[in-house]
Amino acid sequence: MRSKDTMTKPLKVEKILPPGHFYPRLDIPYEGWVELERKMKKIDNSFSLGHLRSIIHEIYIYADGETTLSEIAEKIGLEFGVALDPETLIPVLESLERFGSITIDK
């Protein structure tokens, strides 16, 4: 059973792209990224921090206000061939909202 947060429907803010390269402007500390990688590796050992850049941009691309975080995680996982748990993406989603790239229906 998924949490209520994974049923969130993010909506991109036009013309506010997520930050590029590594993400010093997202407010997740390096240790947070490492923890995210650790959690993801428990689900799929092939996951690496290198996947995060693409995942962050894909979250933005799929953020249409209709697609849930669970659905977005499934689409991204299929595209990149990794299993993603949408629960572990919640901190990234919240950070993108604080950055201004997306809004989250609450």
Image: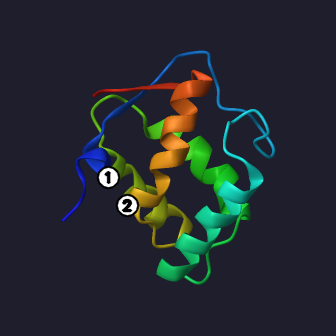
- Residue 16 lies left or right of residue 71; in this view the side is right
* Quarter occupied by the N terminus: bottom left
Q: Amino acid at mark 2?
A: Glu
Question: Which residue is at a point 37% across and 30% down the rendered structure image?
Answer: 64
Q: Secondary structure at mark 2?
A: helix
Q: Which mark is residue 74?
A: 2
The x and y percentages for residue 53 are 69, 50
Question: Which residue is at a point 66% across and 55% down the rendered structure image?
Answer: 32
Q: Amino acid at mark 1?
A: Glu
Question: Which residue is at a point 72% across and 58% down the rendered structure image?
Answer: 31
User: Colour scheme in the image?
Assistant: rainbow
Badges 1 and 2: C-beta atoms under 8 Å apart?
yes
Residue pointed to by mark 1? 71
In the displayed structure, 106 sits above or below 27; it is: above
The x and y percentages for residue 75 are 40, 57
The x and y percentages for residue 5 are 30, 46
